[in-house]
């Protein structure tokens, strides 16, 4: 049995949308993986939208270290 007495498969299914993005976040050491993470978000409708968002995020003045890392 899993959390709250539910079978592990039910818990895994319920958490899939929470766990998968976190795993990608932890592996997002390069720009392509970071873009994939943005594409997984349900509010993202296209690759070009995700790319624009990433550029805006990296352009923020307090993300200088991040900007250098993801060049």
Image: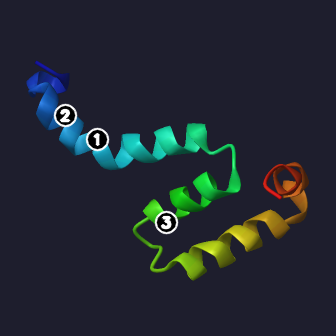
Residue 32: which quarter of the image? bottom right
> Sequence-wise, which precedes: disc 2 or disc 3?
2
Q: Residue 35's spot in the image, x, y percent?
A: 60, 62
Disc 2 crowd, CA 10 A, few/some/many (<14, 14-19, 20+): some
Q: Residue at x 12, y 36 (%)?
A: 10
> How many numbered circles does the render carry?
3
SS at mark 3 in the image: helix
> Sequence-wise, which precedes: disc 1 or disc 3?
1
Circle 2/circle 1 CB separation < 8 Å? yes
On the image, numbered disc 2 is attached to which residue?
11
The foreground one among 5 and 33 is 33
Q: Residue at x 54, y 76 (%)?
A: 47
The foreground one among 54 and 5 is 54
Q: Is 37 left, or right, of 64 in this rendering?
A: left
On the image, numbered disc 3 is attached to which residue?
39
The foreground one among 24 and 61 is 24
On the image, numbered disc 1 is attached to which residue?
15
């Amino acid at each position: 049995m899993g959390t709250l007495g539910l079978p592990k498969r039910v818990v895994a299914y319920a958490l899939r949308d929470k766990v998968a993005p976190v795993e990608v976040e932890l592996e997002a050491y390069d720009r392509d993986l970071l873009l994939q993470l943005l594409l997984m978000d349900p509010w993202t409708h296209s690759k070009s939208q995700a790319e624009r968002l990433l550029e805006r995020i990296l352009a923020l003045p307090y993300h200088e270290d991040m900007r250098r890392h993801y060049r």
